[in-house]
Image (cartoon, rainbow, N blue to C red):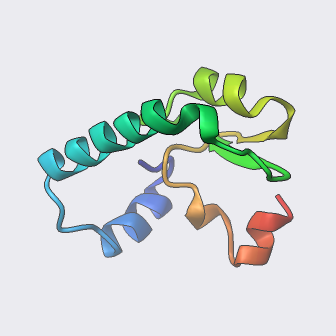
Amino acid sequence: MVFSDEEYEQYNALQSLRTLESCQIEQECLQKLYEQYKDKINPEFDKAIAAENDLIFNLEAQKEFYKEKLIVLKNARHHIFFRFNSFEDILNA
């Protein structure tokens, strides 16, 4: 989920009370929804941000979907939000 000891401490301070099973069910539901609506997805956005070392969402699949709109954060894992101080920082990535 995180890349550094500092991010680990920040992540643990916000740790979810969800079970692993709950997270797996969420992933399965997201996959089903994607399969059902993938032809209706309208990717009207300027960019997408992904972590280079995300162990949850496959980076190659994200590159294929987002193409030139994808910004890959180096030395990052799934939870990238500790890399930013504000929503404006995310928009300016």
Residue depicted at x 22% and y 41%: 24
Q: Quadrant of residue 91?
A: bottom right
**Does residue 7 sit above or below 21 in this rendering?**
below
Residue depicted at x 74% and y 45%: 43
Q: Quadrant of residue 19?
A: bottom left
Q: Nearer the viewer, residue 46 or 17?
A: 46
x, y percent for residue 46: 85, 52
Q: Is residue 44 found left or right of 41 in the rendered image?
A: right
**Does residue 14 sit above or below 92 in this rendering?**
below
Residue depicted at x 38% and y 35%: 31
Q: The C terminus lies in which quarter of the figure?
A: bottom right
Evaluate whether residue 30 shows in this view. yes
x, y percent for residue 57: 48, 34
Q: Nearer the viewer, residue 33 or 11?
A: 33
x, y percent for residue 18: 18, 62
Q: Nearer the viewer, residue 70 or 51?
A: 70
**Does residue 93 sit above or below 53 in this rendering?**
below
